[in-house]
Image: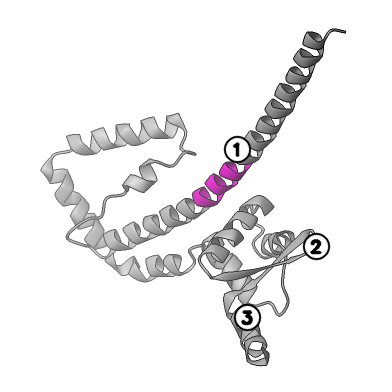
Amino acid sequence: MSENQISTTELTSQYIAQVTSDLERNGKEQERIATDIAALQEQLLALQHDHSVLVNMHQALGGTSPVAATTPAAASVPSQSSGRTKQTKAAKEVKAAKPKKAAATGVKKAEARKPETGKTAAKATTAQPSLVDLIRGHLEAQNEPRSAAEITTALTAAHPERTIKTTVVRTTLENLVARSSAHRNKQGSSVFYTAATEAAAKAEPAAAAG
């Protein structure tokens, strides 16, 4: 084999190794972004649910300045299907075409629903907490560090009606750590989390000893 052929073979091997490394890095980056999107979408859905409850309460109380049912954030939810988007657009067009008399009728209906304010308030109190609140509350209730998998299992058992994924929980935990609302402790290849209040309480005696 000539020197030129040897050089070409070595160069090709280097290119293959570089491309393989780039592919692995690209795949990991896609996975990280996907988990971030899932966590943000979970938080956005919780906010949309709270918004819907508040709008119903506002209408039941006969507010003089109705709150828009669709916020800019709600309109950008990636999980909305095209069919639902078309239905929302059609509903807006029908609403815009209604005469002023229909608007007055709507106000009267809202006034007629005033006696049900207590029921509406009761529904508001049963609104599901966000995943962030669930994770923070679980950490604060624990005496020992917990892994993302352990937290997922506990929350799934406590809230079977919700779909909670370990990847979303891990991303949410990392966001809490970034905001100093939680503490990360790595033991070997495993990562455990504790509430920030507990971590601070443990740090004070250590600092005094030092």
- Quadrant placement of the C terminus: bottom right
> What residue range appears in magenta?
31-41
Q: Is 177 inside the magenta-drawn segment? A: no
Kind of residue sitting beneath label 3:
Glu
Q: Which residue is painted at 52% across and 61% down in the image?
A: 130
The span from disc 2 to disc 3 (Cα, nearest Å) is: 21 Å
Q: Position of residue 102 (x, y in %)?
A: 17, 44
Crowd rating for badge 1 (residues with CA inside 10 Å; few <14, some 14–19, many 20+): few
Which residue is disc 2 drawn over?
A: 188
Residue 161 seen by the camera = no
* Disc on res. 30: 1
Q: Earlier in the sequence, mark 2 or mark 1?
A: 1
* Disc on res. 133: none
Kind of residue sitting beneath label 2:
Gly
The span from disc 3 to disc 1 (Cα, nearest Å) is: 34 Å
Q: Which residue is painted at 55% across and 48% down in the image?
A: 36
